[in-house]
Amino acid sequence: MTSCFRPLFSSLVETLFPRRCPGCGRPPATERDRLCAACLATVVPLRPPLCRLCGLELVGGLESRQLCGDCLRRPPDFVCARSLIRYQGVARRLIHRLKYDGDRVALPALREIAAGFDLGDFADCSAIVPVPLHRQRLRSRGLNQALELARLFFPAAAGVIRVDGLLRQKNTVPQTGLDGAARRRNLRGAFRTGPGLDFCGAVVCLVDDVYTTGTTASLCSQALLAGGAEAVKVLTLARVVAVGDGVGRG
Ligand SMILES: [Zn+2]
Ligand SMILES: [Zn+2]
């Protein structure tokens, strides 16, 4: 298409298919925005101080770099876990669309949400591993949301994203609604490192969509450490935040 026709074509597309916020369907405020102001207002970053290990928002006068009660009682297998935002509002809706509907249309809006967050804590990671889906679930959903998010978080690091860094050997039931102990039982023995992959000495960034109790992150970390990794850092887009900090690590 010649350049003089491009604006005409764009305005025709805009007329036929007006821009809609992928969160709620209303028009966004500006040309550049994907999400409307009402949806953006539901995006809430995790608020420091955070637990040095698991990234939980600390309350009760504690300072950053201190540990939450769970990590004091039982340190996790990863050296740190960080989430960008709370699992609520438009982020929750978009993650659902990506995860359960295989809807990649949610990705640009999730990229808009994630933009601007500092991922410097993960600069020393030499391998990026998405939490895997079982192959049957991957077939039925059409995509692995953790892999899509790894690509979104680290667009310049495609070469170190290990798509098959971890394999899911058990087609477990969805974790939603299970408590910590049930999650551990459900996922026991579920993960192992991919054949022929050597994580020897690597600091690995494990990527997932949502951090709930930390069970998945812990079990994946154990598998990566058993596969030779020196340390595992966990990065999720969102974190379930319970009212009154009621979520312990399970
Ligand atoms: Zn909206
Ligand atoms: Zn903690």
Image: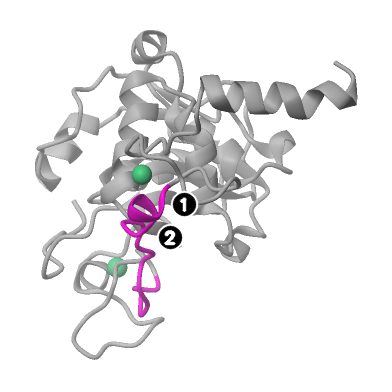
Q: Position of residue 234 (x, y in %)?
A: 45, 52
What sort of colour scheme is used for the picture? Answer: one colour
Image-quarter location of ligand 1? top left
Q: In the displayed structure, would residue 145 be above or below residue 71?
A: above
Using the rendered view, name the quadrant where residue 11 is placed: top right
Mark 2 neighbour density, 10 Å: few (under 14) some (14–19) many (20 or more): many
Q: Is residue 109 left or right of residue 116?
A: left
Circle 2 sits on which residue?
Answer: 82
Q: Position of residue 91 (x, y in %)?
A: 35, 46
Circle 1 sits on which residue?
Answer: 235
Q: Residue at x 47, y 52 (%)?
A: 235
Q: Is residue 44 magenta?
A: yes
Mark 1 neighbour density, 10 Å: few (under 14) some (14–19) many (20 or more): many
Viewport quadrant of the N terminus: top right
Using the rendered view, name the quadrant where residue 122 is placed: bottom right
Does residue 211 appear anywhere in the picture? no
For the residue labelled by badge 2, is the local secondary structure a helix, a strand or a loop? strand
Q: Position of residue 181 (x, y in %)?
A: 11, 44
For the residue labelled by badge 1, is the local secondary structure a helix, a strand or a loop? strand
Give the magenta-colored segment's residue range: 36-52
- Mark 1 and mark 2 lie on one chain; the one further toward the N terminus is 2
